[in-house]
Amino acid sequence: DNGTNYSIPVDPNSIEGWDHFAMVYSELQQSFYLNGKLIHQASAPAPGPFDKSRLFFLGAQEKWKETQTKPAGLFAKGIMRMFRISKVARYDKEFEPADRFKSDAETVVLFDFAKPEKDLLFDASPNKNKGTIYNAKWVDLKQD
């Protein structure tokens, strides 16, 4: 058994603009931040959230369980701008979120959703990972 993936529902918080969501895994603890404010903490699944034997979903649930009480659907609604995974816990207390991310020595993957190629995302980190996008509706965004 390779443990269980966990998810947390996050409702939009900002009246205008973007919301920044961060999940930080440190030791056996997961901390969830919304716009730099701690909103939830939980024990992390062993052996950790990014075990290679697990699938990782962003903006979707892997499957629907009959025991779930709120039928939110399998796919999230919203717009994603950027996504980053780091080798280190970047936050350990409340913080002011950056508007954009840059790749650095601690970046494992950095996807910029404003620069896809059809249904593929290309990693801006030196690792050059790829992501596949399923069932997305592309929209033009006004750039700041």
Image: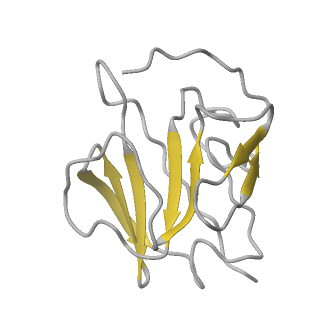
User: On the picture, is 107 further left or further right than 29?
Assistant: right
User: On the picture, is 40 further left or further right than 6?
Assistant: left
In this rendering, does residue 66 appear at all?
A: no
| Residue 142: percent from left, percent from top | 46, 14
| Residue 5: percent from left, percent from top | 63, 65
Quadrant including the C terminus: top left
User: 4 or 19, which is in the foreground?
Assistant: 19
Quadrant including the N terminus: bottom right
- Is residue 116 positioned above or below 5 on the image? above
User: On the picture, is 13 further left or further right than 87?
Assistant: left
Where on the picture, by quarter, is residue 20?
top left
User: 52 or 5, which is in the foreground?
Assistant: 52
| Residue 19: percent from left, percent from top | 36, 35
User: 45 or 56, which is in the foreground?
Assistant: 56
| Residue 118: percent from left, percent from top | 80, 31
**In percent of the image, x 41 and y 85: which residue is there?**
27
**In percent of the image, x 40 and y 68: which residue is there?**
42
- Is residue 101 positioned above or below 119 on the image? below
**In percent of the image, x 58 and y 72: which residue is there?**
49
- Is residue 89 positioned above or below 81 on the image? below
